[in-house]
Image (spheres, rainbow, N blue to C red):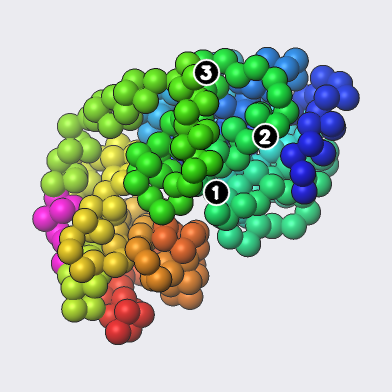
């Protein structure tokens, strides 16, 4: 579907719009949502952004995160529900299926009565969208929002450029992953021209850590064990580790990637015990042909991309780790 279809719809008048993204919003979720909001507001639309739950501390410093048009569903449900009720159009950014927004918010996305727009780069998008922009080859949803803004033709302010570049940076590991294309770098170049500063974003995201994050990375790295004859690295943190180090939301984001830094490792697994929810949260990363989306779907109630996926286990930590060892050995064996 061409981007101009959506441009025509939006240009007809000022719309009341709601922008949503996935549970535990990461840099691309926050960046694409706020970037699109900044842009559409400057175009005269009345836009609310609804995050399902609170972002990690560094992401809360994103330009616009604390604005009056941003609401966190789990914190301020009444206001968020009113935004859904009043909006004429819904945007689903950086998620392929409504369950990704969490149980509480899912019905509000599924039952939304106005026009619906999906902008996303994950596999197998839900149906039921009036405008579905799904491109799995794109580095990030932020890159897709950039494409839309460029095609739409309006001006981009420095705040929009900042958060969109942040989305590119976080979803590409600072332009390291195979998903980085010439288009990605061209988008980055245009965003810098529009006022984004890469060093400012890096400092905000990666050099503003609470001590708990650095301590937990130490523990997580120490837990590392190799599986499948050195082809996989498993890292884990127990509820006790989290408690002793003073865990805060977002502390372990990115830790799983450390496993891929080992020679010969093609798949990395990170398991974090979530005592409150009674589950173990799982993250998977891979290189080359190893499809962690397939692995997460077939064994761990999850999914994602070929090289990055998530899942969960309802079993206790010890039995989850045992089953991870056997399923990984079998998967890569
Ligand atoms: Mn993304």
Instruction: Name the residue located 24 percent from the left edge and 72 percent from the top edge.
Output: 231
When asked about the image quadrant of residue 227, the answer is bottom left
**Mark 2 and mark 3 in contact (Cβ < 8 Å)?**
no
- Residue 222: in magenta span: yes
Q: Say which element carries label 2.
A: helix
Distance from disc 2 to disc 1, alpha carbons, whole Å, reads 13 Å
Q: Which mark is residue 148?
A: 2
Residue 70, relative to residue 320: is it above or below? above
Mark 3 or 2 closer to N-term? 2
Distance from disc 3 to disc 2, alpha carbons, whole Å, reads 15 Å
Instruction: Name the residue located 18 percent from the left edge and 52 percent from the top edge.
Output: 220
**Mark 1 and mark 2 in contact (Cβ < 8 Å)?**
no
Residue most extreme to the right: 12
Q: Which mark is residue 138?
A: 1
Mark 3 or 1 closer to N-term? 1
Distance from disc 3 to disc 1, alpha carbons, whole Å, reads 21 Å
Left of 199 or right of it: where is 80? Answer: right
When asked about the image quadrant of residue 205, the answer is top left
Provide residue 237's location: percent of width, then percent of height.
Answer: 22, 55
Q: Which mark is residue 194?
A: 3
Provide residue 248's location: percent of width, then percent of height.
Answer: 30, 37
Callout 1 environment at 10 Å: few (<14), some (14 to 19), or many (20+)? some
Left of 243 or right of it: where is 156? Answer: right
Mark 2 or 1 closer to N-term? 1
Residue 226, relative to residue 248: is it above or below? below
Instruction: Name the residue located 23 percent from the left edge and 53 percent from the top edge.
Output: 258
Callout 2 environment at 10 Å: few (<14), some (14 to 19), or many (20+)? many
* Magenta-colored span: 219-225
Residue 13, relative to residue 142: is it above or below? above
How many numbered markers are drawn?
3
When asked about the image quadrant of residue 331, the answer is bottom left
Provide residue 41's location: percent of width, then percent of height.
Answer: 68, 18
């Amino acid at each position: 579907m061409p981007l101009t279809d959506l441009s025509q719809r939006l240009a007809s008048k000022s719309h009341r719009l709601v922008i949503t993204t996935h549970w535990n919003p990461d840099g691309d979720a926050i960046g694409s949502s706020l970037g699109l909001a900044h842009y559409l507001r400057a175009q005269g639309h009345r836009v609310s952004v609804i995050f399902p739950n609170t972002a990690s501390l560094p992401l809360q410093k994103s330009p616009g995160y604390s604005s009056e048009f941003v609401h966190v569903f789990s914190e301020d449900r009444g206001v968020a529900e009113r935004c859904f009720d009043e909006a004429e159009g819904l945007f689903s950014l950086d998620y392929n299926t409504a369950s990704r927004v969490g149980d509480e918010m899912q019905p509000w996305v599924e039952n939304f009565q106005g026009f619906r727009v999906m902008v996303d780069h994950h596999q197998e998008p839900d149906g039921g969208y009036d405008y579905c922009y799904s491109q799995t080859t794109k580095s990030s949803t932020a890159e897709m929002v950039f494409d839309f803004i460029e095609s739409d033709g309006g001006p981009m302010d420095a705040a929009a450029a900042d958060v969109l570049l942040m989305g590119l940076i976080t979803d590409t590991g600072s332009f390291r992953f195979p998903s980085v294309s010439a288009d990605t770098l061209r988008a980055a170049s245009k965003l810098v021209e529009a006022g984004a500063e890469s060093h400012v974003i890096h400092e905000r995201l990666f050099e503003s850590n609470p001590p708990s994050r650095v301590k937990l990375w130490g523990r997580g790295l120490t837990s590392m064990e190799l599986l499948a004859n050195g082809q996989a690295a498993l890292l884990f943190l127990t509820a006790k580790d989290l408690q002793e180090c003073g865990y805060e939301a977002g502390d372990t984001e990115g830790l799983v990637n450390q496993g891929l830094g080992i020679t010969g490792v093609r798949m990395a697994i990170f398991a974090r015990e979530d005592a409150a929810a009674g589950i173990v949260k799982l993250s998977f990363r891979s290189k080359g042909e190893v499809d962690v989306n397939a692995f997460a779907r077939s064994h761990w109630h999850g999914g994602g991309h070929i090289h990055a996926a998530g899942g969960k286990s309802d079993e206790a930590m010890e039995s989850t780790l045992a089953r991870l060892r056997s399923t990984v050995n079998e998967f890569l064996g």
